[in-house]
Amino acid sequence: MKLLLATHNPHKRREFGRLLPGHEVVALPEGMSLPPETGRSFAENALAKARAVARVTGEPAIADDSGIEAAALGGAPGIFSARFAGEGADDATNLAKLRRLAPPGSALRYVCALAYADRGRRGERLFEGSCGGVMAGEARGERGFGYDPVFVPDAHRHGRTMGELTDAEKDAISHRGRAARQLLAWLGS
């Protein structure tokens, strides 16, 4: 099945290509803009993006909104993860801010809301996944993106960060991996 992925993020395009085997995950058409992320939750933002792409293209679309929640920061940055250090901030700047504010060993949680929208027979559906972990004492690893170098998943509590895991290891436990497996099971029905 062909699925349009509502993102301009090349990291997410590669990741969803791996996470949805047997489906053709297609990049957003050049020049197509997405609605601003003005929702109050990951789910609202994901649904708005998937709906917009499905409406404009007439094709089944998927969109995720995801981020990190730090217990020491009352759940921040949450839906503001991509712009935690301000509009236009890059991954390194956002990561540096989280490292300044959240102490090593404090609880973290990755969250993903993955929305499916199809103007045809399937309609809309939302899938959610999360992955708990803790803040690493130092950034480690060159793999992944975003906050991965400081996120030590519960499955590797005294071990590697998400930035040190292979793609297969990360996909097996990640928030996006969990949401994508739910989507795959539903599409198979």
Image (cartoon, helix red, strand yellow):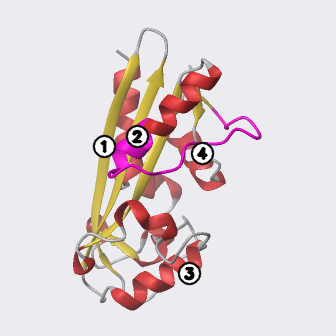
Instruction: Tell me residue 91's x, y (percent).
Output: 57, 72
Instruction: Tell me residue 78's x, y (percent).
Output: 35, 64
- The tag earlier along the polypeptide, 3 or 4, is 4
Residue 128: mark in rendering: 1
Residue 7: mark in rendering: 4
What residue type is disc 2 on? Leu
Q: Please determine whether, in this image, residue 12 is positioned above or below residue 87.
A: above
Left or right: residue 20 versus residue 32 is: left
Density class for disc 4 (Cα within 10 Å; few <14, some 14-19, many ≥20) is many
Residue nearest the viewer, comparing 142 with 98: 98
Q: Label 3, on which residue?
A: 93
Residue positioned most to the right = 30
Instruction: Tell me residue 118's x, y (percent).
Output: 48, 19
Q: Label 2, on which residue?
A: 114
Give the alpha-carbon distance from disc 3 to disc 2, as whole Å: 26 Å
Left or right: residue 30 versus residue 131 is: right
